[in-house]
């Protein structure tokens, strides 16, 4: 902005701000960016799937603990 402000002033205009609205990338760069975004989405999907698997395994483990016998059956002595 500082480089262009004096030229704008010479033309009688005051430069208030400068911004970029759209960036056009070369084809190869666009392809690489698309691949990067797709890889990030796939990594997030894999993470969600692993979390769901872990939760399912934990649920099965909790259920199995409730059904498992506490130990060997106790022996009953006859009164002798």
Image (cartoon, helix red, strand yellow):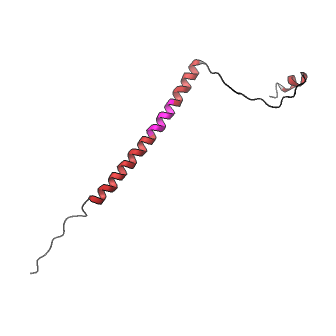
Residue 33's spot in the image, x, y percent?
56, 26
Rendered position, 27 above or below 44: above
Residue 67's spot in the image, x, y percent?
27, 59
Rendered position, 17 above or below 7: below
**Residue under the point 19% across and 66% down:** 73
In the rendered image, the residue lying farthest to the top is 27
Which residues, given as a range, are shown in magenta? 38-46
Rendered position, 60 above or below 43: below
Say whether residue 2 is left or right of residue 53.
Answer: right
* Callout count: 0
Say whether residue 58 is left or right of residue 33.
Answer: left
In the rendered image, the residue lying farthest to the bottom is 80
Task: Give 49 or 6, whichever is nearer the viewer.
Answer: 49
**Residue under the point 87% across and 28% down:** 14
* The C terminus lies in quadrant: bottom left
**Residue under the point 45% across and 41% down:** 47
Rendered position, 31 above or below 63: above
**Residue under the point 90% across and 22% down:** 10
Quadrant of the rendered structure where residue 76 is?
bottom left
**Residue 41 among magenta residues:** yes
Quadrant of the rendered structure where residue 52 is?
top left
Say whether residue 48 is left or right of residue 33.
Answer: left
**Residue 74 among magenta residues:** no
Task: Give 58 or 72, whichever is nearer the viewer.
Answer: 58
Residue 40's spot in the image, x, y percent?
51, 34
Q: Main secondary structure of the magenta part?
A: helix
Residue 18's spot in the image, x, y percent?
77, 29
* The N terminus lies in quadrant: top right
């Amino acid at each position: 902005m500082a480089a262009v402000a004096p030229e704008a002033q010479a033309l009688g205009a005051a430069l208030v701000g400068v911004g970029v609205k759209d960036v056009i990338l070369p084809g190869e760069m666009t392809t690489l960016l698309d691949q990067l975004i797709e890889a990030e989405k796939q990594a997030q999907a894999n993470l969600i799937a692993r979390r769901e698997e872990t939760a399912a395994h934990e649920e099965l483990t909790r259920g199995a603990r409730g059904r498992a016998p506490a130990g060997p059956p106790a022996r009953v002595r006859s009164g002798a």
